[in-house]
Amino acid sequence: MVPQAWYFLLSALLFGLGVAGFAARRNTLVMFMSVELMLNAANLVFIAGARDYLPARGSACALFVIAVAAAEVAVGLALVLAIFRLKKSVVADDVRELRA
Amino acid sequence: MNALLSTMLAATTLADPLWLTLIKSVAVFGITMTLVPLLVLAERRVSAWMQYRVGPNRVGIGGTMQPMADLVKMLFKEELRPDGVPNFLFTAAPAIAATCALAMMAVVPFGGTLEIGGRSIPLVVADVDIGVLCVLALSSIGVYGITLGGWASNSKYSLLGGLRSSAQMISYELTLGITLLSVLVVASGDSFGSFKLSDLVLRQAESGIWNCFKLPLGFVLFTISAFAETNRLPFDLPEAEPELVGGYHTEYSSMRFGLFFLGEYAAMVAGSAVIVCLFLGGWHFPFVTKEAVVGWGGALTQVAVFLTKVLAFLFFFIHVRWTLPRLRYDQLMNLGWKLMLPLALVNLLFAGLGAALGWF
Amino acid sequence: MLSETTAFLIFSAIALVGAVQVVTRRNPVHAALWLVGAFLGVAGLFLTLGAGLLGAIQVMVYAGAIMVLFLFVILLLNLDATPYEGLSVARGASLFVAAATVALIAVPFAQAGELKAAATADAPDLPATAGNVANVLFTQYALPFEVVSLLLLIAMVGAIHLARRTRRDEPV
């Protein structure tokens, strides 16, 4: 039996990589991918934490996270497409109209 | 690769010892790899027969060795690689396509359970709890093979073919999934049901009525979606020779092309096998095979019945290819989203109503 | 047969390498493919944790649908690799933030050790098979389930509205 702490540590690392990618990259598509990575890390915690006592409920919660991720991607990619149509670019720094 | 994947799938169930899983993997792999050249030959001979031609009949007796000759030709052809191509992805793409199609066979039950020497052996490589989902997952990973093949070729035609394939397969996967749900609803009964393909077959064998009679609309929808998922005519837009030269495999030659070719035919075999399991009763046939738990003779009969059904369905695949013209791309999308998807939802509603009112 | 520890080590290595590559690759297609690899690694971890259903759904939804959509958009926009963005104060700060996040998550979890079931006398100790998960989803979590389905509907409508090609004189 692998200790749960290992899974949690791995999940923390994945989440941290997601944070790093989201903060450091300027390509909106890669930023979205980093968000997906963070959501997946959260799922890993749900499943690993629920392993011994509430496996079915852990899986159900992770399912909700996956559904939310799918919704986020649908809207996010539509936004990226709309911005690309306007700016011919997907770099976040090129979209700064609202900055004073 | 197939054996490895099947073994890994089987490892999650821990039902069989490792050696048994290995034997089963090799057997299933062998059957699939025998069916593929057979199918290639059948395609050419059947098309010739349908068009009042002769077809290849020179190599071997009646042309039976033609696939072998094709294979030798492919192996010895020069391997061309266009300029500026990412090496790894260019090679990996056909491998992904072929592997996913072959691995799908791992969850397909060829028969019931073989009772021998006090050991009961289910006649399926990996009788996993999530069999149907495995099929869907592998078919959705298979999309990458074609999409990446198109992208990695560094060519306009290939890229368009790859884009078309990903759009087409995502669209038809929806119909496929929803129709699959209706099958699960019908099979569920009072209990929670299961995703095991073997259980779905068992349910049909017990009631004696195959799912294609309970869900005729679902059967038609699933078959059409399977055609789209395997990129067969009338849905072969990713390759579409007259428009895209050859689509995603324009730049491929030699055995890399051979792998794409193999993947397409293996996907046909796997698709037929899954359809036979879901809708046509799998190994069950009235008056011939009824018992799920059998000895040697029964097991062989079951496998024979199953393979006969698969071959009949494969003939249907070929027949359709040489009968129907190719759809235009907008027609394909309209069909998928405006007709198939709503009908799939109607079918699911029908299945739910039927299950609630006890029609099945 | 794979022992659980070996499986954990293999799959976590796949997931970590994939994640690092997603963040560092400059070509978005490569980043997307590495992300697929990372998702497959996490799916393997789900399998080792006995949540085969979630593993299959992870492959189907994440690797099969979401990432294909990403790839589709990248190919559609015909994006090239972004130029090297250089080191800046902002990037250094983001790395620091990421490291701090890891520490903030990892330390409490590591100290907590094994999770115990907290006051769940009614908790049925059921494995995460499809039937059990469905049972939980449609009884105990029925309300969140409906909310999520509503969310998906809204997202679908929003996505279609956003991606629809508007007439030229209209602002997007």
Image (cartoon, helix red, strand yellow):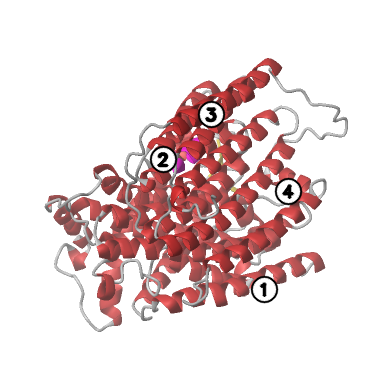
Q: Chain of mark 4?
A: C
Q: Same subunit under labels 4 and 1?
A: no
Res. C34 mark: 2
- Image quarter for residue B343? bottom right
Q: Which residues are magenta?
A: C34-41
Q: Earlier in the sequence, mark 2 or mark 3?
A: 2
Q: Main secondary structure of the magenta part?
A: helix
Q: Same subunit under labels 3 and 1?
A: no
User: Taking B187 as reference, is B225 left or right?
Assistant: left
Q: Nearer the viewer, mark 3 or mark 1?
A: 3
Quadrant of image for the N terminus of chain B: top left
Q: Residue B124: x, y in percent?
A: 51, 45
Give the crowd class for mark 3: few <14, some 14-19, many >=20 residues within 10 Å: many
Label 4 – label 3 distance at C-alpha: 36 Å
Q: Going 42% across and 46% down the picture, which residue do you hit? A: C32
Q: Chain of mark 1?
A: B
Q: Is residue B280 visible?
A: no
Q: Nearer the viewer, mark 4 or mark 3?
A: 3
Please state which amino acid type lies under the numbered disc 1: Val
To which residue does mark 4 refer? C134
Q: Same subunit under labels 2 and 3?
A: yes
To which residue does mark 1 refer? B346
Please state which amino acid type lies under the numbered disc 2: Trp
Label 2 – label 4 distance at C-alpha: 31 Å
Q: Earlier in the sequence, mark 4 or mark 3?
A: 3
Picture layout, residue C130 above or below residue B315: above
Picture layout, residue B329 above or below residue A97: below
To which residue does mark 3 refer? C98
Label 2 – label 1 distance at C-alpha: 38 Å
Q: Check whether the beta carbons of the residues at disc 4 and disc 1 lie within 8 A of each other.
A: no
Q: Same subunit under labels 2 and 1?
A: no
